[in-house]
Image (cartoon, rainbow, N blue to C red):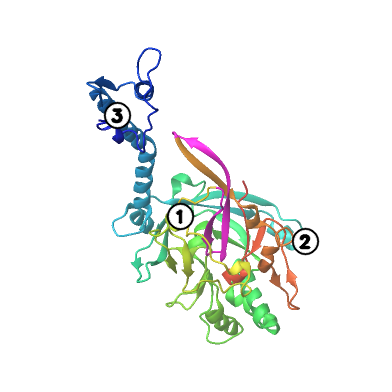
Amino acid sequence: DLGGIGNFFPGPIRFLQDEPDLKGNSRAQNMMFMKTPKLDLKMGNLHINRVMYLAGFGAIVFLIGLFFATSGTDMMINAKIKKSLVLEEGSEGLKRFQKMPFPLEFKVFLFNITNPDDVMMGGKPVLTEVGPYTYDLFKEKPDLKFLSDGMIEYNMTYQFHFNPQKSRGSESDVVTALNIPLLGTATMVEETFPMGLGFLNNAIPFLFPNITDIFVSVTVGDLLFKGTIIQCNYTSGPAMPICNGLKGRAPPTIWREEDTKHFRFAMFRHKNKTSEGPYKVKTGKEDISEVGQIVEYQHRNKLKNWDKNSSCTIIRGTDTTIFGPPKNPHDDLYIFVPDVCLSFGASYVNTTIQHGIPLNKYYSAEKNMASAARDPDNLCRCAKDDDGVRQCLKDGVIDASPCQGAPVIVSNPIS
């Protein structure tokens, strides 16, 4: 009678032929004693010692406890993180995704031209860096909605609030800078109607009264958000054709005041208290690594600002407000930047420990600001001249003119 031995030893147990050893014990009994020293011999039958039951039960409990203390705990933590990150009704991830609980810092440094008269005479400009002028940037998605295909659609809104405590200077500081609306208007006329540059020369005194050169002295607040005036309340005269042209071709940085009929220019006013999008993104419910991944921007799955089917048209990554855990930490992370109409990558550097938590560190990928000579995939960023020949910039800068509708060159901040 083997009793419950089968519960602890799965599969058949073979016994040798029962022959006595030198001590008169059977070999089978010795074999059982060697395999299971807790077995007792009673009345010719084998019985499982109660101690073995308790030891076996205790071992199972210990193993279960060890599992939950290691793998089980990790699984539960990962499951809880996944549940909180998924963009679904009631999740913590959706709450933070829809409205960031804290503002970002938006810092602006400006270069003040201290010798504009010398520059007009052919001299080298002398620049003084001023700032930072720091703004609290709030991001929100007030009209977020769930779609029938399991995706989410929303518009992104931005609000900028000047933070004097974190700024070095005030919005009333006066700086001398290039007259960007003047140069932008000239570029627009040259591209659309080159013969009209003569009209522009006659129109400049009407569009920009008291301006005698390509520089302008303006407050920081007006330059960044409030706007500088382009006078266009004319019904006749040399400025009227230029103003009419602005109505249909003005970039986002120039807008018209309905009450005065003037135009205004500001570098970031079009971003403040306005909506951008719509975005269509994944919720992460099927694959948490894809949470927040952009599927469409402005109802398109590819960008229209660049050469058709080029690498520049690919929309990749998130809007920067959420990132899912990558399947492989060595894979690049991507964000989409609508201000330049491009997706940028961040490459894995190493893993560090902060407060006992392992963190993966990522830096801006080298190809983000690489020239076409160094990375042929970036050839689509090169603008074409009148003869269709591409004019490529060097490493470190990007021509964002196709995105902004105005001559804009973008570079990394100076560290």
Looking at the rendered structure, the secondary structure element under dot 2 is: loop
Q: Describe residue 4's horizontal placement relative to residue 139 as left or right.
A: left
Residue that protrudes farthest toward the right in the picture:
122
- Return the residue at label 1: 289
From the image, tell me which residue sits under label 3.
Answer: 56
Q: Amino acid at mark 1?
A: Ser
- Which is nearer the N-term, disc 3 or disc 1? 3
For residue 373, side relative to residue 101 (left or right): right
Mark 2 — residue? 122
**Residue 360 locus on image (x, y percent):** 52, 43
Residue 218, how many percent across, how many down? 56, 60
Say what secondary structure mark 1 lies in: helix
Magenta-colored segment: predominant secondary structure: strand
Question: Range of the magenta residues?
Answer: 330-356
**In which quarter of the view is residue 43 placed?**
top left
Picture residue at 28% right of the left edge, 28% below the top: 58
Q: Name which quarter of the figure residue 211 lies in.
A: bottom right
Distance between the Cα atoms at labels 2 and 3? 93 Å
Tell which of 234 and 53 is nearer to you.
53
* CA gap, disc 2 and disc 1: 56 Å
Mark 3 and mark 2 in contact (Cβ < 8 Å)?
no
Q: Nearer the viewer, residue 178 or 206?
A: 178
| Percent x, y of residue 182 | 62, 71
Q: Is residue 210 above or below residue 126?
A: below
Instruction: Say which of marks 3 and 1 sits in front.
Output: 3
| Residue 334 sits inside the magenta stretch | yes
Mark 3 residue type: Gly
